[in-house]
Image: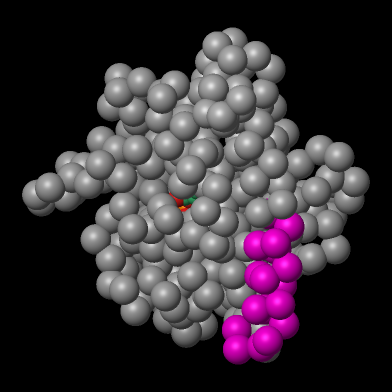
Amino acid sequence: MKVVLSGVKPSGIPTLGNYIGAIRNFARLQKEMKDHHFIFFVADLHAITVPHDVEELRKNIRAVAALYLACGLTTENASFFIQSEVPEHAEMCYVLQSVCYMGELERMTQYKDKARKQKSGIPVALFNYPTLMAADILLYDANYVPVGDDQKQHLELARNIAERFNNRYGETFVVPEALINKTGARIMNLQEPTKKMDKSESNNKGCIFLLESINSAKKKIKSAVTDSENKIQYHKTKKPGISNLMTIYSALTGLSNKEIEKKYASGSYGAFKTELAEIVGGEIAALQKRYNEIINSSDLDKILDDGRERAREIASKKLKEVYKKVGLTRR
Ligand code: TYM
């Protein structure tokens, strides 16, 4: 059975960007690819690569797990678990470090961006982040990895590591393929539409968090930065603000940019934003309702416990195979 795998880092409450670029997509794929096994995990080991509040992290881990289910993912053909509860991730990461090059990690744009923001002492774990991500994927022989545009480079590295390992030690890993949506793979910040919407930037007016109040989310859409032309037309570089809002509209309604342009040919930005605010508000309200039913339920713990057992079964076998391949066995 082919495997589809992805993860979300609990370094904050997921945003509308995470939802459109990734989680909503997972739900669609799960319906379309019923004969595949889906693996969704909370990438908590990744969250300690940047400064964090311990209590916040604890809360966010559970919140991300509940949000998966609130966003429509089901246990029917999927396992859900918390990354740090499956120690094979860290162990596999260590082995993969022996086939991953410093130069490769130094080229990662996300590392360069994050390292620039860190005032002092860049943790080794931040540098090594993409190797852990490769371990997450290769441990489960994942065929497909649905992600947003910002993870493309990390996926490319995971493919290179898999191929290099296979060449050096013999066929071991499946070389994974990224699944990146055409629409919504990079939702931009509502206040600075040339920057990615990012959950690590808390209290940001340009970022809609999936668990914030509906009113506040609507307000953020209504006060999103646009140009002064008042013409609803898609042009990513010349009109980044309105284009970003059109992308959100398109992803949530299924209308193409052309159809949106036609629909609002004589409309103002104000009217468009008001309608989009209603659409976003409605979508978030529905998932918050489900979230509130799930977050404190024992069902969530049962799902995560079962998921961990299933994940460990697969991961421990793969790790054993890898240890053997590299010579880490007594006989
Ligand atoms: P994370 O938590 O930053 O993001 C989770 C998913 O959301 C996508 N995404 C976006 N999509 C559209 N617009 C945006 N503004 C936006 N921001 C984020 C991301 O591309 C991602 O798909 N390293 C990963 C987590 C991870 C992982 C893995 C993913 C760890 N191991 C193995 C896949 C496979 C991360 O930090 O995602």
- The residue at 28%/72% (across/down) is 53
- For residue 36, which quarter of the picture? top right
- The residue at 57%/56% (across/down) is 86
Magenta range: 295-311
Nearer-the-camera pick, 256 or 1:
1
- For residue 216, which quarter of the picture? bottom left
Q: Give x and y (percent) for residue 259.
A: 70, 48
Q: Give x and y (percent) for residue 213.
A: 47, 84
Q: With 269 as the anchor, is 264 left or right in this view?
A: right
- For this orientation, the residue located farthest to the left is 120
- The residue at 30%/19% (across/down) is 103
Q: With 133 as the anchor, is 166 left or right in this view?
A: right
Residue 306 in view: yes
Q: With 276 as the anchor, is 202 left or right in this view?
A: left
Is residue 82 in the magenta section? Answer: no
Residue 175 in view: no
Residue 200, above or below 238? below
Nearer-the-camera pick, 153 or 223:
153
Is residue 297 in the magenta section? Answer: yes
Residue 318, above or below 256? above
Q: Give x and y (percent) for residue 190.
A: 38, 59
Residue 191, above or below 184? below
Nearer-the-camera pick, 249 or 228:
249
